[in-house]
Image (cartoon, rainbow, N blue to C red):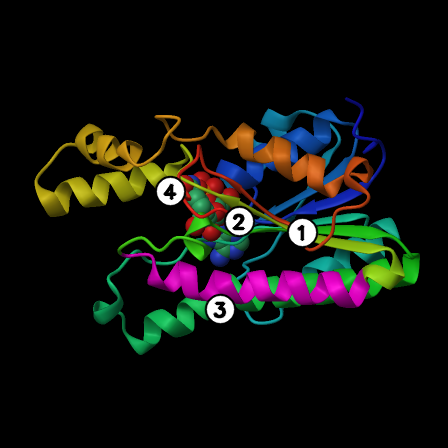
Amino acid sequence: MDLRLNDKVVLVTAASKGIGFAVAERFAREGARVIISSRGGALLDDAIERIGGNVTKQAADLTQDGSGTKLVERIIDQYGRLDILVSNTPGPRIVPALETTDEDWEAAYGALLRPAVQLSRRAAQQMCLQGSGSIVFLTSTWVKQPAVGGVLSATMRSGVSALAKQLALELASFGVRVNQVMPGATGTDRMRDIMRAKSVQHATTEDEERAVTVRDIPLGRWAEAVEIADTVAFLASPVSSFSTGVAISIDGGAVRSTL
Ligand SMILES: NC(=O)c1ccc[n+]([C@@H]2O[C@H](COP(=O)([O-])OP(=O)(O)OC[C@H]3O[C@@H](n4cnc5c(N)ncnc54)[C@H](OP(=O)(O)O)[C@@H]3O)[C@@H](O)[C@H]2O)c1
C-alpha cells in the first residue's frame, strides 16, 4: 500500500535506536524527509548510516525543559514546515509504587510528559498555520493495563493519552490529526536491560525473565520494533485521513479489555 508519505517532513524523537529508530527507518523507506533526534553522539550518527538516505539528525536532550519546543523550531526554520511529529520519549525507572521518590516523579514528568507537551504544542502551532499535519504519540499498554513496577510510566503516559485526546478535539477543525500508539513488550535494548535487572534481582536468567513476560502474551512473543513502526506510519499517513483521537495497542493480545 502506498502510504503517500513521499516528501513529507517527519520528526521522530528518541530515535537513535529501538522503537523510535524503527519508526524513522519506516518513514525514510516511504520517501519521507525524516529528522531523527536523540541526545546525539555515536549512536545517532550510526542511526543515520543505518537508515542510509532521506534522513538528517538534530541532537536534543528531551529531559531539558524547553528542548522539545526548540527542537521543533529548528526544524521549522530549516524546512519551512512540519508534516508529521512522532513524539517518542525516554523511558522512566521501573520501580514499585511505594519505593518511588519525589525525585523519581519529577524525573518521570521531565522525561515523559513535559517533552510530549512541548513538542506537540509547537508542532501543532505550525500545523494549524499549514492547515494540515499529523501527530502520533508513542505511549505504552501500561496506560490501559497496569504492571508491577510500571507506575511512573503508566501515570505520566496517561497524561500523554489525555493530551492526545484533547489535541485531537481542538485541532481537528484545522486539519490536524492526533493519534496514539501503545506498544506492548517489544524487543529493544530497553527491554533487554529490564530483563537483565530482573534476573539479578530474582537470581534467575534473562531467558527465564523473558519467558515470564511472554506467558501473558497470547501471540507468545514480544513485538519486533518494526511491527510498532508499521502502525505508526499507517496512522500518521494520509491513508488514515479519517482517524483522529484513536489509541491502538500493538501488544500480541496482552491487553484483555474489550475497548
Ligand atoms: N520496549 C518496550 O517494550 C516498550 C513498550 C512500551 C513502551 N516503551 C517506551 O518506548 C520508549 C522507547 O523505548 P525503546 O524500547 O525503543 O528504548 P531504547 O531502545 O532504549 O531507545 C531509547 C531511545 O531514547 C533515546 N533517549 C534516551 N534518553 C534521551 C533523552 N534524554 N533525550 C532524547 N532521547 C533520549 C535514546 O537515544 P540516545 O541514547 O542516543 O539519547 C534511544 O534512541 C520508552 O519511553 C519506553 O519506555 C517501550
Q: Can residue 141 be seen by looking at this rendering?
A: yes
Label 4, ligand 1: CB separation under 8 Å: yes
**Which residue was labeled with disc 2?**
259
Quick check: 157 above or below 138?
Answer: below
Q: Can residue 70 be seen by looking at this rendering?
A: no
- Provide residue 30's location: percent of width, then percent of height: 76, 27
**Label 4 crowd (10 A; few <14 / some 14-19 / many >=20):** some
Relative side of 50 to 120, left or right = left
Overall secondary structure of the magenta section: helix
Q: Quadrant of residue 106?
A: bottom left
Q: Secondary structure at mark 3?
A: helix
**Which residue was labeled with disc 4?**
190
Q: Quadrant of residue 173?
A: bottom right
- Sequence order check, earlier mark of 2 and 1: 1
Task: Give the magenta part as a residue range.
Answer: 149-171
- Provide residue 216's location: percent of width, then percent of height: 30, 36
Quick check: 250 above or below 182?
Answer: above
Q: Secondary structure at mark 1?
A: strand
- Sequence order check, earlier mark of 1 and 4: 1
**Which residue was labeled with disc 3?**
110
Please check the rendered image and state whether residue 242 is part of the magenta-colored stretch, yes or no.
Answer: no
Please check the rendered image and state whether residue 169 is part of the magenta-colored stretch, yes or no.
Answer: yes
Which quarter of the image is occupied by the N terminus?
Answer: top right
Q: Foreground residue, 180 or 84?
A: 180
